[in-house]
Image (spheres, rainbow, N blue to C red):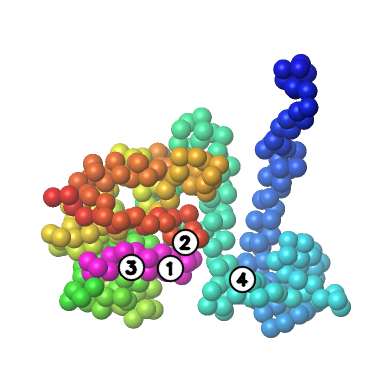
Amino acid sequence: MTAVENPVGTAPAHPAAPAVTQRRLYRMMRVYKETALLRAGVRTGVFDALADGPADAATVAGRLGAAERGARLLLDALAALELVTTTDDGRYDLDDGARELLVRTSPTYYGGMVDVVASSEEWDALRDLDAAVLAGGSVRDVDAETPGYSYWETFARSVGPVTVPTAHLLGDLLGTWADGRDDLRILDLACGHGIYGFTLAGRWAGAHVTGVDWENVCAITARHAAEQGLADRFTAVPGDMFTTPVDEPQDLVLVTNVLHHFSEERATELLRRAAADLAPGGRIGVVGFVASDVPARDPEPYLFSILMLVWTAAGEVHTEAAHRRMCAAAGLEIEATQQVPGLPFHVLTARRAD
């Protein structure tokens, strides 16, 4: 090192530790095992078997109808991940967080999300990531854009409860415009579980929700409407969200968690369809991931874009600038945007620019 590089009396600079290390790479290579363990725990009912208090492996195995060895090794691995706890006498138990999030009877149950975020369909699609990178899109015969895809039934059954806070945030952004209306016609495109529209209908007693989705999904949406006492305020319209018509102009059109399935151009087409369905003075509500300009600062949208690479023809999570371009191209003027606290989602409301 020369005197210029290290002047007399100056300590040598210490470069920052590299971001890529053997330890980090090994962690990335094995983390799928943690996902598999969580999913197995949820699907076998291990957490439910411990809901009433501590139990040993033999007791848990009996409750599950499982081999004792299988239950013991699963419980030990879950304990290693601190998803279950152990007692001094060698039994297994749950802490308060596990009871709230992983026991099916809990009102805050979150375990069902393993069938979405860690679904077999996503895992299978990601096996084709190398080929999708080379092709620039899905290489699968059946993917997220296939009409009637059965995964969307799982999504509709599993995701609904976790969307409620986001739906309430959307309602807050629309409140000044919607509060006090005698009636409100809501069109939910790609309605899925329907919880966005149903949550808003719970807020505004005069609201009626029309949901458009594939026929196999609409059956689940209708069931959710009945469970929430909204069967008489919901109309299912099976079909394609881009082309299936509705009978009358709508006061509010919802486009939730769907724009990332398409290119910017195709997503703009969907927003144009939404704008065309608006009654005078109507509003559009958009919910979804928004990508930042610095991937390392907000990685989740970029990881989700990889799922879109293997699962769609041209989908990806769009940036804030892209959302502005899409809305402008669809003749929409953005009124408000807000990130959902604690989640990588944004809520956007807009009206027709004319």
Which SS does the magenta portion mostly show? helix
Within 10 Å of disc 4 (Cα), the crowding (few <14, some 14-19, many 20+) is: many
Q: Which of the marked residues, 1 or 3, is nearer the chain's N terminus?
A: 1
Q: Of residues 95 and 338, which is closer to you in this image?
A: 338
Q: Which of marks 1 and 4 is nearer the N terminus?
A: 4
Judged by depth in the image, the label closer to the viewer, 1 or 4, is 1
> Which of the two marks, 4 or 3, is nearer to us in this view?
3
Residue type at tag 2 = Pro
| Image side of residue 343 versus residue 7, left or right | left
The disc at residue 102 is: 4
Residue of label 3: 172
How far apart are labels 1 and 3 at the CA level?
11 Å
Q: Which of marks 4 and 3 is nearer the N terminus?
A: 4
Residue type marked 4 = Leu
Sequence-wise first label, 1 or 2 = 1
> Residue 192, image x and y in percent?
38, 62
Q: Nearer the viewer, residue 185 or 62?
A: 185
**Numbered tag placed on residue 165 in the rendering:** 1
Which residue is the site of mark 2? 341
Mark 4 vs mark 2, CA separation in Å: 22 Å
Which label sits on residue 65? none
User: Crowding near pointer 3: few (<14 within 10 Å), some, many (20+)?
Assistant: some
Name the front one of labels 1 and 3: 3
Mark sitting earlier along the chain (2/3) = 3
Judged left or right of residue 68, residue 348 is: left
Q: What stretch is highlighted in magenta?
A: 158-178
In this view of the protein, which residue sits in the foreground, 21 or 7?
7
For numbered disc 2, what is the local secondary structure?
A: loop
Instruction: Report if residue 159 lies within the magenta region.
Output: yes
User: Depth check: 327 or 60 in front?
Assistant: 327
Mark 3 residue type: Asp
